[in-house]
Amino acid sequence: MRYWLMKSEPSDVSIDDLAAMPQQAVAWYGVRNYQARNFMRDQMGVGDKVFFYHSSCAEPGIAGLAEVSKLAYPDATQFDASNKYFDPKATSQNPRWFNVDVRFVKKTRLVGIKELRDYPELATLRILQKGNRLSITPIDPAEWNFIMKIL
């Protein structure tokens, strides 16, 4: 099992939206970064644990817990010319973008990025590194365990 931090803009899908969805699951669509895509396609497994992180909002931070509920499959938005995530180079025979499904586990208190920066135990947390803009990052088990204690 692996641990991940996955960013979502709450204006698109928030932790509350996920909790209200049928089967409390959503396809993690729209990722257009090759490294983040590769994490989903090549490394994520069903049951992997996820920190659901609200980004690009007034108070960014960890808002809840989720888990990977379906292995990677082609992201349908790449084929839809009316979708903002459309990719004209993608074909059904040669998809470029993949997503996994994530399932709601629990809403938590919001652990903001400012608070995360306060803990020396999280000094190497990827989301806190200068220049990191990835929407999906792996979490070290020690970091996962520490954050779980402060939730």
Image (cartoon, rainbow, N blue to C red):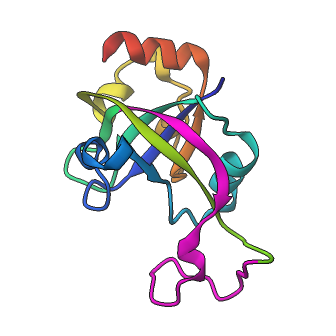
The image quadrant that residue 137 belongs to is top right
Magenta residue check for 91:
yes
Q: In which quarter of the image is residue 116?
A: top left
Could you say where residue 68 lies in the image, as x and y percent from the top left?
A: 55, 38
Q: Residue at x 55, y 34 (%)?
A: 4
Look at the image and say whether residue 6 sits in the magenta stretch. Answer: no
Along the line of sight, which residue is nearer the eye, 23 or 15?
A: 23
Residue 15: give x, y in percent of width and height. Answer: 29, 42
Quick one: quadrant of the C terminus?
top left
Q: What are the residue bounds of the magenta stretch?
A: 65-92
- The answer to whether 119 appears left or right of 67 in the picture is left
Q: Residue pushed farthest front?
A: 23
| Nearer-the-camera pick, 14 or 130 | 14
Query: In the current view of this chain or complex, which residue is farthest to the right?
Result: 93
Q: Residue at point 48% right, 21% down?
A: 122
Residue 114 vertical placement versus 32 (above, below): above
Q: Where is residue 102 in the image (x, y as percent from the top left)?
A: 48, 43
At a point 39% along the width and 38% down the height, the residue shown is 52
Q: Is residue 60 above or below residue 98?
A: above
